[in-house]
């Protein structure tokens, strides 16, 4: 029996920690006896990765343990609007999968991805990986797949977090991947062999849920690394040779990652009750080895894997005896926590003078999960003392990663900060301040713990459920993704839950707000309302009027509105009623501390109900009767960012190719990057067929907008027009590298290109726009750019820029329609300062193809 690992690291597009990921996980696996093959740099091309996987399959035998690991960017391509002529409509590779919008396609990004062309896709589609995995599990069923990447690129305001997903998707990419998969199928790719979900033969560890983001960051040692990879390696180190399941291991990984990035939730799929790198299945670990110390205490190796907290109580038992206080060696209470073990004070029972070498420790009572908090003011003795009395928060160790801090400002006022920034306005020091800050910290701890709540595979609820949401616009549903969306102050939203099974379930919906407020959206039924088969519940529906109005989202008073913040809607579906009422709490903006009290857990509580009860009360949890299999449950989440600004105007223009970054990246982009002088040139436009415009005379129009600078208050846009006569199918327009912009680029460059039929008396777009400069729409756009973008908080400035760009582009399109009648939106993008305004040729190789046209453009720096 051999242990084999294929480790792939594709360090591209701004990632700098991928090679570190591969090196550190290789070291961890080497200690576990793996034969390791690493593919990075020029070896991690599409061909190199596929060849490496084929070699892995060829070398493996039935008794082998095999691990495939990938670190790098992930990519996705959203399906076009449903239509009968969808080229992938009957493609098995594009059928819907749980947690993803129907038809979305996903892929990983090898190091040679960027030269992809219309005829050669250099990514590796998830379908291809699934086929390879299915072939591997036909050889050996002991397979583990770990993917540290994401497929939906959403931006974090924290500049230290680099998202591990391509941040741009083109409407042509979906067609490109569909053609790629169709070609592979014609060449014999056995698409039907792939197992999309529920593969019983492989354990799959993923850095985040579908449509979430995975991040790399600089850790405490100054090393760039993937958050998921780092947490996975630390958990493996803690596990050592303990009988730990993948479920238990990933519970630890999830807690660690969510404490650092609340919108990255690692998951485990497949047979998670397997012991690490084994086919043997068991329940999550309950017993730990006990190592006595010379001072009469004990060390519990691997305790972090159980989520052990300070004050947890263990019963120490001789080997092979059931847990029973009457026959126990004694009790141990944890009073120190380390990265790999816990230390506990030992009390021996009468008749015992030492701990047997084969003894095991079984946790009988568990303390609430404590959130590590750092207090940066050495004079804040009252606050430090208050934190030490809490069961929900604790003081972080000096070298412990910590994302929640209490900081003083120069005036001596205090604020709680997380990775995004301050959670509230400054609070003056004085009597009662420490107690108020502790209340707020405990609210953050409850919200953090609720987000990290996981499913126990022993209690899995198999009833299929539909959980979806979206905006309500004029009474009409506008569906949105389950993660990564940005909603704005004042938006109306709906949430739908439908029971697609044959048994009734009990449903509770909890909203974890931006201020750490936990609100029960179904508070009319504190233990969950009964949802019968084929029935649905729609939040935001007015039953009296029969109208879908939606629920209005508002930015909480007292929360600093500098940037958007994460919010979560949690669905808890159970086979029996479960009390979630104690979790309801006000947010940080509330001045008075809510007295939640303490409750004694009922003996008949399920594991889920006990966990929820403990999150609410902060008390101890009895572990002796933990497992109640008759209560089954499922958890689903909707993750989004709430922006403190009103929704900016939307663009009504449709473009054949839209390569703008994800909206979250546009709204939460870092500002203040160096301005550059650039030239934007349209290099080539090729007319394959002229059927759309039905004219031999064509004009090409382009608009470029950018941000404003303090020393240049002019309206930051430029429009250019070029005309061409007697254009025939297959003609390449003589553009002569048409200059569409020359000047300073500040913060961003927005580019929009149209192709239109031309008439002899039509005016240039610049002249058409100039006449509208005094109109109210354009004046408003200019005011937003010139005012808000310079002086307002970052979130308002970004929203203003998006809104101004939408107004200008909509106006330009309307003017073109009025002037020439027929106009086609060819291309739209936004190039950011953080990516050096896209300097270079686009695309790097070949041309962009959109229906009957293909083209390329270049962004150049100008000295």
Image (cartoon, rainbow, N blue to C red):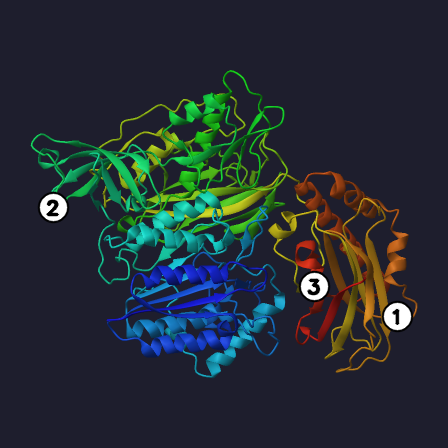
Q: Residue at x 79, y 60 (%)?
A: 703
Vertical position of residue 79 compared to residue 527: above or below: below
Residue ranking furthest to the top: 431
Kindly indicate the quadrant of the structure image that contains residue 411.
Answer: top right
Residue sticking out furthest to the front = 294
Question: At which x and y percent is residue 717?
Answer: 82, 54
User: Residue 216, image x and y in percent?
Assistant: 51, 54
Q: Position of residue 467 (x, y in %)?
A: 45, 50
Rendered position, 247 above or below 735:
above
Mark 3 Cα shell of 10 Å, populated few (<14), some (14-19), many (≥20) = some
Mark 1 closeness class: few <14, some 14–19, many ≥20 residues within 10 Å? some
Q: In the rendered view, does 762 fall on the left or right side of 344?
A: right
- The residue beneath circle 2 is 319
Mark 3, residue position: 655
Label 1 vs label 2, nearer the camera: 2
Judge left or right: residue 600 versus residue 377: left
Q: Quadrant of the C terminus?
A: bottom right
Question: Mark 1 highlights which residue?
Answer: 759
Q: Residue at x 26, y 58 (%)?
A: 274
């Amino acid at each position: 029996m051999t242990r084999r690992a294929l480790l792939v690291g594709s360090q591209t597009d701004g990632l700098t920690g991928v090679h570190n990921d591969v090196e550190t996980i290789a070291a961890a696996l080497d200690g576990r006896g793996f034969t390791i093959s690493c593919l990075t740099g020029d070896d991690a091309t599409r061909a190199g990765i596929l060849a490496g996987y084929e070699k892995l399959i060829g070398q493996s035998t039935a008794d082998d343990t095999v691990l495939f690991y990938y670190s790098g960017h992930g990519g996705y391509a959203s399906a076009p609007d449903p239509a009968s002529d969808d080229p992938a409509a009957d493609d098995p590779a594009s059928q819907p999968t749980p947690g993803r919008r129907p038809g979305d396609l996903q892929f990983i990004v090898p190091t040679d991805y960027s030269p992809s062309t219309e005829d050669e896709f250099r990514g590796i589609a998830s379908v291809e990986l699934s086929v390879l995995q299915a072939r591997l599990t036909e050889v050996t069923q002991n397979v583990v797949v770990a993917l540290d990447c994401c497929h939906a690129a959403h931006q974090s305001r924290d500049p230290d977090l680099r998202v591990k997903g391509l941040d741009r998707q083109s409407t042509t990419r979906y067609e490109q991947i569909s053609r790629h998969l169709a070609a592979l199928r014609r060449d014999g790719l056995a698409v039907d062999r792939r197992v999309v979900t529920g593969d019983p033969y492989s354990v799959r560890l993923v850095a985040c849920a579908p449509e979430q983001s995975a991040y790399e960051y600089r850790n405490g040692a100054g090393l760039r690394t993937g958050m998921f990879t780092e947490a996975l390696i630390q958990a493996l180190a803690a596990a050592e040779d303990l009988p730990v399941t993948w479920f238990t291991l990933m519970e630890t990984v999830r807690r660690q990652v969510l404490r650092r990035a609340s919108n990255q939730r690692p998951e485990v799929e497949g047979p998670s009750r397997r012991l690490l790198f084994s086919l043997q299945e068991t329940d999550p670990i309950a017993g730990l080895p006990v190592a006595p110390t010379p001072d009469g205490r004990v060390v519990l190796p691997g305790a972090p894997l159980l989520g052990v907290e300070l004050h947890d109580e263990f019963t120490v038992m001789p080997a092979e005896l059931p847990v029973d206080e009457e026959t126990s060696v004694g009790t141990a209470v944890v009073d120190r926590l380390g990265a790999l073990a816990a230390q506990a004070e030992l009390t021996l029972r009468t008749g015992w003078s030492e701990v047997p070498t084969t003894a095991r420790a079984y946790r009988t009572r568990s303390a609430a999960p404590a959130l590590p908090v750092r207090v940066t003011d050495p004079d804040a003795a009252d606050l430090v003392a208050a934190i030490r009395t809490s069961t929900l928060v604790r003081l972080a160790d000096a070298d412990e990663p910590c994302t929640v801090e209490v900081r003083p400002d120069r005036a001596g006022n205090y604020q709680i900060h997380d990775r995004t920034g301050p959670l509230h306005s400054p609070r003056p020091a004085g009597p009662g301040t420490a107690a108020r800050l502790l209340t707020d910290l405990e609210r953050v701890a409850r919200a953090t713990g609720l987000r990290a709540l996981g499913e126990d595979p022993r209690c899995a609820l198999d009833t299929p459920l539909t959980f979806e949401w979206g905006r309500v616009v004029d009474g009409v549903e506008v569906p949105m993704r389950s993660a990564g969306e940005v909603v704005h102050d004042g938006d109306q939203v709906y949430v739908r839950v439908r029971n697609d099974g044959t048994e009734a379930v009990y449903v509770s919906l909890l909203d974890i707000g931006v201020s750490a407020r936990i609100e029960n959206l179904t508070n009319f039924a504190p233990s969950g309302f009964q949802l019968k088969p084929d029935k649905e519940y729609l939040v935001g529906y007015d039953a009296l009027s029969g109208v879908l109005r939606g629920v209005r989202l508002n930015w909480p008073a007292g929360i600093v509105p500098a940037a958007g913040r994460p919010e979560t809607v949690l669905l808890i579906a159970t086979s029996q009623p479960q009390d979630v009422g104690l979790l309801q709490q006000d947010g940080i903006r509330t001045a008075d501390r809510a007295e939640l009290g303490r409750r004694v857990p009922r003996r008949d509580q399920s594991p889920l109900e006990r966990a929820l009860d403990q999150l609410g009360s902060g008390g101890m949890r009895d572990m002796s009767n933990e497992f109640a299999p008759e209560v089954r449950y499922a958890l689903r989440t909707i993750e989004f960012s709430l922006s403190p600004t009103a929704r900016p105007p939307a663009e009504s223009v449709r473009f054949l190719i839209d390569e703008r970054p994800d909206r979250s990246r546009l709204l939460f982009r870092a500002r203040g990057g160096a301005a550059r002088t650039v030239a934007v040139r349209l290099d080539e436009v090729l007319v394959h067929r002229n059927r759309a415009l039905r004219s031999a005379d064509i004009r090409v129009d382009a608009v470029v907008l950018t941000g404003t600078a303090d020393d240049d208050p002019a309206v930051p846009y430029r429009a250019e027009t070029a005309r061409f006569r007697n254009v025939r199918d297959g003609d390449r327009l003589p553009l002569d590298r048409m200059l569409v912009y020359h000047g300073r680029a500040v913060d961003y460059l927005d580019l929009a290109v149209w192709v239109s039929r031309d008439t002899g008396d039509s005016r240039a777009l610049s002249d058409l726009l100039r006449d509208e400069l005094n109109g109210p729409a354009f004046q408003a756009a200019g005011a937003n750019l010139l005012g808000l973008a310079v002086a307002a908080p970052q979130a308002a400035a970004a929203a203003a820029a998006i809104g101004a760009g939408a107004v200008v582009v909509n106006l330009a399109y309307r003017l073109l329609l009025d002037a020439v009648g027929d106009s086609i939106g060819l291309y739209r993008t936004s190039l950011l300062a953080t990516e050096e305004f896209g300097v270079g040729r686009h695309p790097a190789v070949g041309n962009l193809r959109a229906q009957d046209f293909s083209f390329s453009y270049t962004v150049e720096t100008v000295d």
